[in-house]
Image (tube, rainbow, N blue to C red):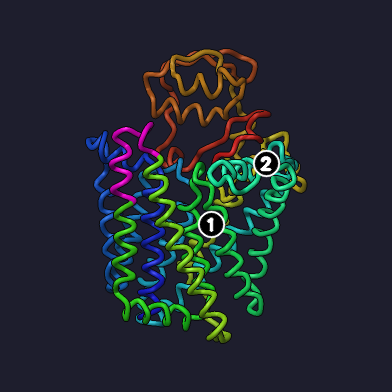
Amino acid sequence: MKAFAAWSLCWAAAILFSITASPDWFWTLLRHPATASPIHVALAAVAFVVVLRPLSPWVVVLLAAVQVADVAAALPEVPNHRLILTFVDLALIATLIRGRRGDQWFDAFVPAARMILVSLYAFAFFAKLNADFLDPSSSCAAQFFGNVTRWWPVIPDAALLRRGAVWAALVAEGLLAVTLCVPRLRVAAVIGGLMFHFMLALDATKVFLNFSSVMFALLISFLPRAFLDSLGADLERRPGLRTGLGAGLLAIVGSGLYAVTDWSTRANLHVWVRQIVWSVYALGVMGYTIRWCAREYRPEAPLPLPGAAAIAVIALVWLDGLSPYLGLKTRTTLDMYSNLRLEADRSNHFLVPRSLDVFGFLRDRVAILETDDPDLRRAYVETGEEMPYVQLRDYLTRHPRVRVRYLRGGAQASSVGTREPLPYALQKLLVFRPLGERSRRECVW
């Protein structure tokens, strides 16, 4: 199982890059340990074990299960890359519990992982077909390019380059969705995708290396198993590679715990440790991939179709990606910072005139007139944005002491907490962007 040992190393590294990329994880562990879930520590501990030693697939399944539990606890506000981690982990678990063993199991899992990645690129590309993403004055891609130029002064910040960044993101995601499905183009697509995500990770302000690390692990799954066999064999011959990666990841953890004690003055230490460790890892993966493909690439035999359980997971991916068009939710929907604005009566998308709003969540909207909650005041009262009533119910269910006066359907109402608590299942699933003109310029997942 050399192939699986190699891939699981990259997957565990992606999980560690993901949870240590922002200060929140360190802040919870160090400054508010009473609120920290045991899952936070367990996830990092199991991921480190998988990075350091090639173990039974069941250890990786344990890692997958802990990661799924961590995301389930954090729902509904979970970044897209962590949702992708969860979907792939569910497919991994679903494939293994079917009873297959050895290479047969891994060969059955890989097609599911590939389908999830292609779906992500397809939804991200389609969401970006809107006027505001293609306008450099509002496009998230242009904003993120500006972040890159501030961190890397050797890259000039010019209007032409910002426009180029917009079109590069759109074209890259569209091409990847197509070329990864074409066997003759797959090697070029994988290498191009690795380079694309390495460039995205240069933005240390928005922190895309967590997303890029997940994409790295999924992209190399598109190469023949001989590639991962070769990588696994090299990792066996050179155990210091695992140790070095583990030490780098541990350095990220250490720098984060140190920096969070005085984030205002120590943040840059953590940022640069994180960026250097990621860059060494990413360049190593890219270099190995390019060298192997140039020397040893041979077309692979067709792989089996995913099983019914894995297909069900892929259906969940599609439901998540379709959510803004159906009106089920408008955040964490695989649109990947697309500036997409879809409401019940309007849209900035070139092909979709409005959300179908199948349950009426977007039509039933409220304007917050007054509140004692600073977050609601800042997000809605001061901006004039509106919100779906179901989102207000959710917020007041979670914050029962909040006082709010709002306008709904032309009538004013006041409330302390809510008399209509949102069912727990809906609390975990529904999350919406603010409704209004400003939402199309906001770059949030």
Amino acid tagged 1: Val
Q: Secondary structure at mark 2?
A: loop
Q: Residue at 61%, 74% (x, y): give it.
A: 186
Mark number displayed over residue 405: none
* Residue 355: x %, y % from top left: 68, 41
| Residue 436 visible from this viewpoint | yes
Residues drawn in magenta: 252-267
- The one of 95 and 378 positioned closer to us in this rendering: 378
Residue 306 visible? The answer is no
Q: Main secondary structure of the magenta part?
A: helix
Give whichever of discs 2 and 1 has the lower sequence position: 2
* Extreme residue toward the left, this view: 34
Q: Compared with residue 262, is residue 302 higher up or lower down, i.e. above or below?
A: below
Placement of 305 over or under 207, stated as above or below: below
Count numbered badges in the picture.
2
- The quarter of the image holding the C terminus is top right
From the viewer's perspective, is residue 443 above or below residue 96? above
Give the crowd class for mark 1: few <14, some 14-19, many >=20 residues within 10 Å: many
Q: Can you identify the residue that label 2 sits on?
A: 139
Q: Please say whether residue 261 is one of the residues in the magenta stretch.
A: yes
Query: Disc 2 and disc 1: Cα gap in Å?
Result: 25 Å
The percent coordinates of residue 398 (x first, y second) are 39, 29
- Name the residue rendered at 41%, 52% in the picture: 18
Instruction: Tell me the residue that label 1 is attached to.
Output: 317
Frontmost of labels 2 and 1 is 2
Q: Position of residue 328 (x, y in %)?
A: 57, 42
Q: Secondary structure at mark 1?
A: helix
Find residue 8 and report its horizontal and vertical position in percent: 37, 69
User: Residue 28 sits in which quadrant?
Assistant: top left
Q: Which three-letter amino acid code belongs to the residue tagged 2?
A: Ser
The crowding category of the residue bearing disc 2, from other C-alpha atoms within 10 Å (few below 14, some 14 to 19, many at least 20), is many
